[in-house]
Amino acid sequence: MPDFPLILLTAIGLSLIMTLAWIYQKSVGNAGWVDVFWTAGMGLAGLALALAPIPGRSWPTDRQALISILVTFWALRLAIHLARRVAQGPEDVRYANFRTEWAPRFQLYLFGFLQIQAAAAIVLTLSVLLAARNPVSAIRPLDWLGAALLAVAIVGEAIADAQLARFKSVPANRGRVCDVGLWGWSRHPNYFFEWIGWLAYPVMAIDLSGRYSWGWMAFSAPAFMYWLLVHVSGIPPLEKQMLRSRGAAYKAYQAATHAFFPFPPRRASAGAPEKAKS
């Protein structure tokens, strides 16, 4: 059974981290920094939950050590990437739109929004705890499969981010959609690989023998992340903005390229001169 006092302490910690995020973004005038705090906060929470002492054991299990390494690498890679992007560019379009939509109470509404994000982080990091508390102490093939999934997710997301950055760095691509590489197979390959990463912990949590029924609850993390990315805070606001700013060019990209799961393009689209930059 999950350690509910530990979960409560983690929830309080995440709430405080997002409060610090709110204070920091207000001081610098760029709300994009809250994404960096959220990622780093989940990394810290995941690390704490992975290594939290298990009653009756004086040392972390091999599985706990493996999970702690995985969650640390994930958080560091994504937080550093986001920090560089926020530091080098204008405010993320989502938060810029919120400034307009929520004016003149933007800061008040943003504070509430960040506390909701803290609550969402608990749902996600719970899967880390459930995986770490799997009572089968030895590392199993399923654990290595979970580790492989997260490794693929980290590498795939890094490749997608690098391809987009490289595309944007070419002056000739100004005003065009990035539909090269992974972006020709999915309109949001970075989101897809982020989702893949959250499948790793349920794979490590489940016990096919049926002795650890709590492990199946870890599938709530990828289900919740899919809902967030595809239906709430990921694809919908981003594509709304792209349609507003790029119009017909982005509609053509939508018609040619699958939204989330990577598949071959429906028709050739790479290099079309009317494409707008993502």
Image: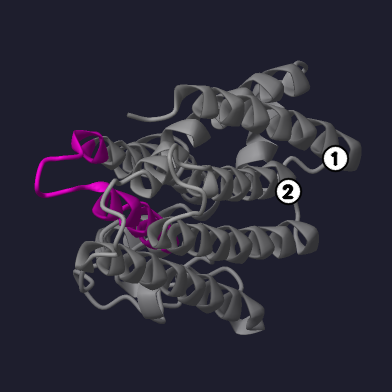
Residue flagged by tag 2: what amino acid is it?
A: Glu
Name the one closer to the observer, 270 or 138: 138
Q: Report how many numbered discs are placed on residues in the image.
A: 2
**Residue assigned mark 1:** 29
Q: Is residue 174 magenta?
A: no
State which quarter of the image contains the N terminus. Answer: top left
Near mark 2 (Cα within 10 A), the count class, few <14, some 14-19 or many ≥20, is some
Q: Nearer the viewer, residue 41 or 210?
A: 210
Q: Secondary structure at mark 2?
A: loop
How would you classify the magenta stretch by its main secondary structure? helix
Residue 110 percent across, percent down from the top left = 68, 25
The answer to which quarter of the image holds residue 100 is top right
Q: What span is colored magenta in the figure? A: 190-216
User: Percent position (x, y) of residue 130?
Assistant: 35, 41
Instruction: Kindly identify the amino acid type of the residue bearing the numbered disc 1.
Output: Gly
Q: Position of residue 132 (x, y in %)?
A: 39, 48
Residue drawn at point x = 64 percent, y = 35 percent: 97
* Residue tagged 2: 91
> Sequence-wise, which precedes: disc 1 or disc 2?
1
The answer to whether the residue labelled 1 contacts the one labelled 2, judged by CB atoms less than 8 Å apart, is yes
In this rendering, the answer to whether 7 lies above or below 127 is above
